């Protein structure tokens, strides 16, 4: 439930993705959790989040204030730690507690004026990386619920431009799932994994590859027909599915695995 009070929007519970995108004034008070990209491109105003914030809160903001009283997951790298503040007051709203103050987003602007406050007791990992951990419970017995990112690789581009999508080389490059080493160990160091869509209606078997360049709780699949099987259909009203940031379940394959070729996928799943 949400209500508007003269330039102030109050959400009594949780909110979805892209809340406050492009906000330039006013206030948004969210008493629960928010999804991904809350405050994206914010250029003024104030956003209060009483619960947790998912991926990239405040990303590309240049001005304004965001306060997060829960845990931030997958923090945007363009924010710089400034100092610690106690019992902050923004727009006449008194918010008690010890907060970590960040300024950003330096990834989008040289001298940003955006300020992001994160409750210290919930977000110590943002300034002490050895304490960082994803939300409790993303690992479960026999699998993980991971944030899926996709993207094109250099080798994949070379294969595509050569018109060789139906080759073994393309399968080896794209029918893979990169996993953080700690998550890979939790899965039992499998050779293959099943990647299952969040609604559990679709599943694809891929070769598992540990990769310490990823954050824990995330996996990467080259943007291809294999990734298309498990990404969500929600388009954020943009006409294109969310190729980065949807959730999937990843579980080890304990029996002999079958990796489908692009042609087999077209015939078996789309045919």
Image (spheres, rainbow, N blue to C red):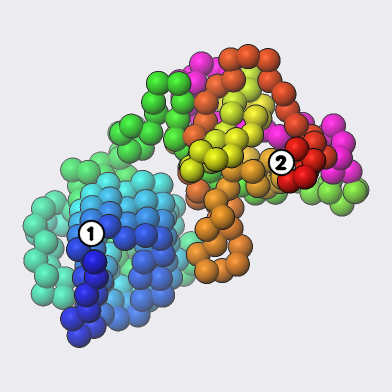
User: In the image, is residue 184 part of the stretch drawn in magenta?
Assistant: yes
Of 124 and 244, the residue lying toward us: 244
**Residue 168 image point, x, y percent:** 85, 32
Tag 1–tag 2 contact (CB < 8 Å): no
Tell me if residue 203 comes above or below residue 270 in the rendering: above
Mark 1 or 2 closer to N-term?
1
Q: Looking at the image, is mark 1 or mark 2 nearer the viewer?
A: 2
Q: Residues within 10 Å of mark 2 (few under 14, many from 20)?
A: few
Of 163 and 119, the residue lying toward us: 163
**Residue at screen point 16% across, 75% down:** 91
**Residue 6 image point, x, y percent:** 20, 85
**Residue at screen point 41% across, 56% down:** 36
Q: Quadrant of residue 63?
A: bottom left
Query: Which numbered marker is on residue 228?
Result: none
**Residue at screen point 55% across, 21% down:** 252
Q: Which residues are magenta?
A: 164-190
Q: CA distance from mark 1 to mark 2?
A: 38 Å
Q: Quadrant of residue 3?
A: bottom left
**Residue 147 image point, x, y percent:** 48, 42
User: In the image, is residue 205 part of the stretch drawn in magenta?
Assistant: no
**Residue at screen point 52% across, 26% down:** 251
Does 187 sit left or right of 141 as displayed?
right
Does 155 sit left or right of 71 as displayed?
right
Secondary structure of the residue carrying numbered label 2: loop
From the image, which quarter does the N terminus lie in?
Answer: bottom left
Does 157 sit left or right of 213 as displayed?
right
Q: Residues within 10 Å of mark 1 (few under 14, many from 20)?
A: some
Query: Which numbered marker is on residue 269?
Result: 2
Q: Which residue is mark 1?
A: 13
From the image, which quarter does the C terminus lie in?
Answer: top right
């Amino acid at each position: 439930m949400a209500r508007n009070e003269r330039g102030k929007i109050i959400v009594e519970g949780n909110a979805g993705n892209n809340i406050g995108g492009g906000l330039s004034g006013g206030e948004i008070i969210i008493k629960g959790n928010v999804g991904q990209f809350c405050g994206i491109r914010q250029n003024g105003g104030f956003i209060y989040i009483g619960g947790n914030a998912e991926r990239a809160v405040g990303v590309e903001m240049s001005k304004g204030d965001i306060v997060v009283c829960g845990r931030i997951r997958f923090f945007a790298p363009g924010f710089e730690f400034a100092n610690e503040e106690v019992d902050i007051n923004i727009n006449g709203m008194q918010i008690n507690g010890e907060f970590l103050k960040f300024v950003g987003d330096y990834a989008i602007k040289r001298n940003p004026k955006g300020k992001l406050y994160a409750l210290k007791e919930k977000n110590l990992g943002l300034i002490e990386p050895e304490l960082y951990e994803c939300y409790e419970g993303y690992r479960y017995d026999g699998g993980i619920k991971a944030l899926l990112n996709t993207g094109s690789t250099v080798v994949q581009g070379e294969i595509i431009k050569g018109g060789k999508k139906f080759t073994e080389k393309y399968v080896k490059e794209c029918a893979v799932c990169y996993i953080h080493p700690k998550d890979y160990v939790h899965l039992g160091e499998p050779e293959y994994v099943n990647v299952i869509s969040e609604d559990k209606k679709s599943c694809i078997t891929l070769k598992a590859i540990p990769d310490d360049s990823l954050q824990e709780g995330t996996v990467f699949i080259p943007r291809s027909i294999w990734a298309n099987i498990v990404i969500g259909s929600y388009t954020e009203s943009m006409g294109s599915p969310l190729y980065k940031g949807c959730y999937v379940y990843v579980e080890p394959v304990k029996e002999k695995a079958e990796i489908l070729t692009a042609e087999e996928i077209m015939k078996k799943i789309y045919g």
